[in-house]
Amino acid sequence: MIIPSILLPIEILLNILINEQLQESFCLTFVTETKLTVKIPKNVSSMIIQPNNSVLVEQILDTSEKGCSDYIIQMHEPENFMIAFEKVNHLGDIRRSDKKLIFLPFQDDLDNSSILTDILSLVETGFVANILLIVPSLQSSGDCMVYDMITHTFVGADEEVQMPLYLDRWDSCTGHFERGASLFPHDMSNLYGKTVKVAAFTYKPYVLLDLDPSLNPLGRDGMEMRIIDEFCRWVNCTVEIIRDDAHEWGEIYENNTGVGVLGNVVEDRADIGITALYSWYEEYRVLDFSAPIIRTAITCVAPAPRVLTSWDLPLVPFTWTMWICLLFAFFYASFALSLAQRSTDNIFLDTFGMMITQTREDATSWRIRSITGWMLVTGLIIDNAYGGGLASSFTVPKYEPSIDTVEDLVDRGMEWGATHDAWIFSIILSEEPLIKSLLRQFKTYPADILKQKSFSRSMAFSIEHLPAGYFAIGEYITKEAAMDLEIMLDKVYYEQCVVMLRKSSPYTAKLSELVGRLHQSGLMLSWETQVALKYLDFKVQLEVRLSRARKDLEEIEPLSLKQLLGIYIFYFGGLALALLVFFGELLFKCSKPSIVL
């Protein structure tokens, strides 16, 4: 656009601001009820909105989604823009921490000054760091217009953050600023003690609250808590903890309200949310995420397999498939023998005897001899295989099948769970049949119920495997319970922990920069180790870490009655059955009347 030879003072000032303050902008949006004559730099695109209060939200949303997120506003009622701008922040997908808003006076009169400065008292204004008000000054005279550059204090004590902050003054006659001050001073490098509200609850090792001052002077610690404390040391802010321990992670409702950590952030009761918050899709639609801070793996500790009971040891050498095949071979050989000898006399006893390498009466028929020979060879192989398997069963302890993978957990039909549904937020949208089955088995219980279930061997418990090798385990799993639990080999899923903030929060970019520095220095791994060694139950950690090595530590015991109990059960059970059949035959024979010829 070519600038005419004559410009209004406000247009001259606006051109100066665009060239000096908005050169790095990608796109500018002009929300103006009057026509402005400006020259846009070649590297900056622009859009113009003729504001209509009935559709103002849709107008701003359209420009915001196209990347035009720096605004120049000239409206008779500028507070309408701020209300619509706040709604767009919640509706849109574009997020920027450093959006810039420049408000121009609708008319060059002093009455318009109070309309602009009243914007600073709006709640919506407190969420934007870069606001510049161009207000007509009392010192304007004649043809010389003087404009004050005003913003909100934003930093410092809570009662001062909405106070006007006079930055500079521009005179249209001189064409210069009096001080040459920065017109967007809030670069988040120094918050001058500003209170930053952080939503959290105790979940080791991420966040620990209510600590003894002898352990930590601040009464709080944890991997994520250290990130927040380090952030406030860096930018000079004050941490205020916002708690909703009863709801833990909480949830967000369809009307953008909620409970727990998530609810505190989405309703702006807190500026920042922490405590093992993953990159959940549904939450990302309404909140902003920092750079990932911790990569965690979610797995389960399930009931450890126990040594098989002695009564079924005689069945252990062969699998159930093998036993079925043996049974089929027994009946098939019996049928073949009955055909060969053209009689059913003693076919089952003879077949069973040959399968355990016992001979039968000599036969002259080549058919019977052929079947007998093959059965003796088969019986010899089966007997030796069974004997070797039985010997190994007595020598090496045999265990129940362990739960190693997600498939094992689903196939067993065992419920798994924790105190909150947040453990399944990451996989709840999955279309995989296996994951859907897994989700149906997930249950939530209070901590005291979970503690009882940890001893009942009826449930698996979700835990986190952290990058430095430690585990985030609920307090309901004690050392005694952990001794009978075993960690799965498979991981249910992997996730990235993030810090959650409101959309386009002014803290997001600075916080992500800090996270990058922490990863570069390796402090995250160091903090995990320090917190784990200081606050976690080391015995529980050790039991979980070494849970799969317990079998290697089993002591070798001499053969005793308990190993032979199963054989004796089968022996005496068979003997009792044989006696019952024998006496039954006697009774049947005695009750049968004798025939006298």
Image (cartoon, rainbow, N blue to C red):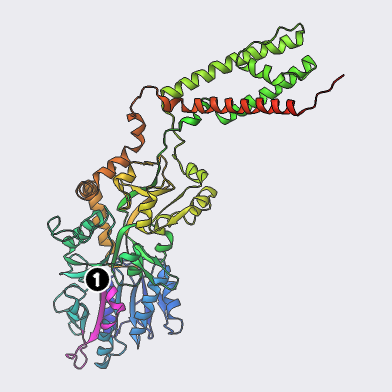
Q: Position of residue 214 (x, y in %)?
A: 12, 56
Q: Is residue 314 left or right of residue 27?
A: right
Residue type (three-letter) at the residue carrying disc 1: Glu
Q: In the rendered image of this protein, does residue 512 appear above or below residue 47?
A: above
Q: Quadrant of the N terminus?
A: bottom left
Q: Which residue is mark 1?
A: 20
In the image, 417 versus 501, the foreground residue is 417
In the image, 63 versus 571, the foreground residue is 571
Q: Is residue 528 left or right of residue 588?
A: left
Q: Position of residue 555 (x, y in %)?
A: 33, 27
Looking at the image, can residue 94 be seen?
no
The image quarter in which residue 280 lies: bottom left
The image quarter in which residue 167 lies: bottom left
Looking at the image, can residue 8 be seen?
yes
Q: Quadrant of the C terminus?
A: top right
Magenta segment boundaries in residue numbering: 121-147
Q: Residue at x 54, y 15 (%)?
A: 384
